[in-house]
Amino acid sequence: MQNRGNIRAIMNKPTPTVSTARRQFLKFMAASPYVAALGGVAAYLRQSAFAQSSPAADDLITNPSQALDVMDFQEVAHRKVLRGHWAYMTSGVDDDATVRANHEGYQHVELRPRRLRDASKLDMHVDLFGTTYNSPIYLCPTGGDRSFHPEGEVAVARAAKARGTLQVLSTETSMPVEDVIQALGRPVWQQFYSPSQWDAAAKIMQRVQTAGVTVLALTVDRTAGRNSETFMRLRGRDLSSCGGCHNGGAGPSNSDRPMYKGIDMKGVQGQNAAMDWAWVDRIRQAWKGKFLIKGIDGREDAKLCVEHGIDGIMVSNHGGRSIETLRPTIEALPEVVAEVNGRIPVFIDGGVRRGTDAFKALALGAKAVGIGRPMLWGLGAFGQAGVDRVVEILQGELKLVMGNCGTRTIADITREYVATPDWKA
C-alpha cells in the first residue's frame, strides 16, 4: 500500500523532465523491499522487463583490486550466491525500512573539518580490552558464512588476520570456533545467542572459553522471533533442493550448527524468549571474561547495563533484521554514549558503507564500528580476497577522512567534528 501511495504521488506531480523522472523512478524502486531483497535496483533491472538497463557482466569487477568502494562487490556476490541465501542476507523484517534507515541515517550527520593540521602521520590503531587492532573497524558476527563461500568464517578470519582486524564470531557459525581461531591467530570475540535452557547455555560458554575466547557478546534484540517477510517471498517456493544441505529442510537445524555439537538440544530453543536481567546476571557470574550486550538502542537499557556490571554495549538493531524500529543505530548511539558517560565502551553496527560513516560514528562516541553486509558481499564475490579488499577500502577511506578533518589519532575524533542539524533536540 505504501508503494502504491508513492506511485500516486509521483503521478500527480507536474510533468518532469526525462532525467528528473528517471531519478524519481529509481528512488521509488530503491524504497521497495522486494528490490532490496533482489540485491538493489541494478539487480532488479537485470531480472525484470528493464533488463536492457542492467549492468552488463563486463561492467562488474572481476578481481577485488578493481573495486573502488565496497558497493562494487554487491552485484558480483549476488550473481554467485544461491538465491535463498542471498535473500536471507540482504533483507530485513516487515517492509525492510530499518535496513534502509540504518545507512540513510549517516546522511544526516555532517562533517566539520578542521584545516591546516599536520596530516602526514596518522594512526588508526585502537586498543579494545587489551588487544591492539589496526583500526576501529571490525567484522560483525554473521551466521552461516559458508552460505556465501565454501571457506566461510575461516576465510573471514584469514582476511581479518591480514588486516589486523577484530572478528566477532556468531553462535550460528558454519565453521567450528576452534578452526576460526586457528585461522585468525588470536581469539575471536564470541557473539552469544543464549539457549532457553541453562545447561545448553553453560556448555556453549565453556566451549568457547576453552577455545580461548575472552569476550562474550550476548545478543538481546531478537529473542521473540522476527517477521522475515521479504526473505520468505524472495527465496522461492521450491525448497526441495535445500534438503541436500540442511537436515531440517529450508534452513539449518541445531544439529547442523557446529556450536551445538555434543550438546543435547532436544526441546531447547536456540534463543531464550524468557531471558531477562536475572538471566543476564547468571551469565555475568558464569562468564570469566569481558561481557558485552549487543542490541541496546536506548538510554534506559544502557543505564541497566552499567548497573548490572556489563563491560560494554553494542548499539545494534541486527542490521534492521530484528524489529522494524525505523530508527537508525547512528541516531540511537548518542543517547547510549551519554548515559554510560565513559564508564564502559560503546560499539555500533548497522548501515556502515564508507570510511566517512565510521568516522561519524566514532565522533558520536563509538569505540569501534562493525560491518556486516559489506563483509558478506566481499566473501560471496571473492572469498578471503574479497573480505580483505573490503576492509582495505574502509580502512583507507577512514584514514583519508581523518587526515582531511585534522584528526591524527582515533582518540582525536570527537563530537566537535560532526553536526546533526536534522536531528530532533
Image: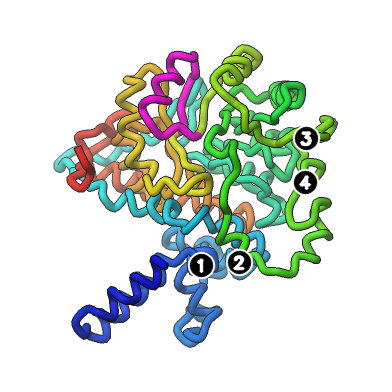
Closer to the N terminus: mark 4 or mark 3? 4
Observer-nearest of 28 and 164: 28
Highlighted magenta segment, given as a residue range: 295-314
Q: Which residue is at 26% across, 36% downward?
A: 407
* Residue 29 locus on image (x, y percent): 41, 72
Colour theme:
rainbow
- At label 1, the amino acid type is Tyr
Give the alpha-carbon distance from disc 4 to disc 2, as whole Å.
21 Å
Reading the image, the residue beneath label 1 is 34
Q: SS at mark 4?
A: loop
Observer-nearest of 155 and 149: 149
Q: Quadrant of residue 419?
A: top left
Give the alpha-carbon distance from disc 4 to disc 3, as whole Å.
10 Å
Reading the image, the residue beneath label 4 is 253
* Residue 334 locus on image (x, y percent): 31, 33
Reading the image, the residue beneath label 3 is 260
